Image (tube, grey):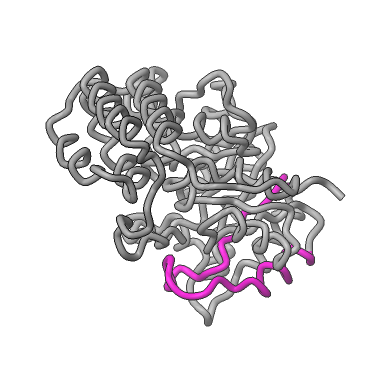
Amino acid sequence: MAEPKFLLAPMDGMTRASFRLVCFEYGADGATTEMIQSLALGRAKKKLSNTFAETMVRYPGEGFLAAQLIGSVPAMMAESARRLTAMGRFDAIDINMGCPARKVVGSGNGSALLKTPEKAVEVMKAVRDATPLPVQLKLRLGWDEGSITAPELVREAETLGFSSVTLHGRTRTQMYKGPVDVAKIREIAESVSIPVYANGGVTCARDALDFLEQTNAAGVAIGRAALKQPWIFDDIHRLRRGEPVSERLAPERVALLERLAALACGHRPEKVAVSEMRKFCGWLLPGFTGADEVLARLNDVVTLDGFNRLMDGWLEGLMREGDVHPRAELLPKQTLDTV
């Protein structure tokens, strides 16, 4: 039996090259880009816009990488798949039929396709015929409890020769709330011969391993939990080797944030990249002494040098006091909302 894989799931606005590379460095077995709109890509001129260029950067050191394509017009999806293939920087094409965001489904894309399986299959066939690359499918169980269409679509993916499926164990109407249907994921995974990766509800490395066992899937795709714990992949591999895992201390977190900031500045304007680091600092710093002050001061930081000075100064203070461990009493309430 093949070794299970633990993947970085695609997240809109998050799985850019800088964050993907950090996750690969922590041991992710694969990743998928954020959404690439087929409508925009299919109509783009030969020279892509800066938006597309930064979305589809690939750093040396990234492992297996799929380009995530979203859309509902078969011809446009096919043309976009051909263009992505011609770029020569991706290992697979991933079709998004799982995104539940209102702006996405309102255009008939993402999980909206789960309501019309015939149309979904047309999209799948168009992309499969347009590229020699492996084609993957990401989807949810269905639109709602009354329309569980994933079994049908996963079987179709198998028939069409798709390389894998990532299945989120909730319906679109559930969004990210409520229990993940572990039994349904297992039923679908065991009904086909292609790899099915389970997705949804993971908050830590132990969760991921329990999820893997409960679903009998080929692996687990981890999304929002990785935003707060990019090291979750390393923790998973440690647990599988029987090694202990421990909380990540302030020096490692600061080094991670500074590396992420430097990578991001490599392909986005410095001011924009540094501004976006506030989100990651908000996820990685709570629990440490003085974190609130650092987060407040970040609002005035606009350069990479300023960001590094702030991080280094804060860390030096923690080191002097021997206060590099996160403390439970300093954590905000509801910290495990990464589902």
Residue that lies at the very extreme toward the left in this rendered image: 300
Count of numbered circles in the view:
0
Q: Is residue 237 left or right of residue 98?
A: right
Q: Is residue 20 above or below residue 285?
A: above
Q: Nearer the viewer, residue 122 or 62?
A: 62
* Residue at figure coordinates x 12%, y 31% from the top left: 300
The answer to if 70 sits in the magenta stretch is no
In the visual, does 197 lie left or right of 322? right
The answer, for residue 44, to whether it is visible in the render is: no
Look at the image and tell me whether residue 303 can be seen.
yes
Task: Identify the residue shown where x is 65% and y is 42%.
Answer: 135
Q: Residue at x 67, y 63 (%)?
A: 210
Q: Is residue 309 left or right of residue 35?
A: left
Question: What segment is highlighted magenta in the picture?
Answer: 162-191
List the single residue furthest toward the right. 1
Name the spot of residue 330 as percent of width and height, x first: 30, 55
Residue 34's spot in the image, x, y percent?
Answer: 44, 40
| Rendered location of residue 201, percent (x, y) | 52, 63
Image: 132 above or below 223: above
Q: Identify which residue, 261 or 81, lies in the foreground.
A: 261
Residue 161 in the image: state x and y as whole percent: 75, 47
* Magenta run includes residue 188: yes
Tell which residue pokes out farthest to the front in this image.
321
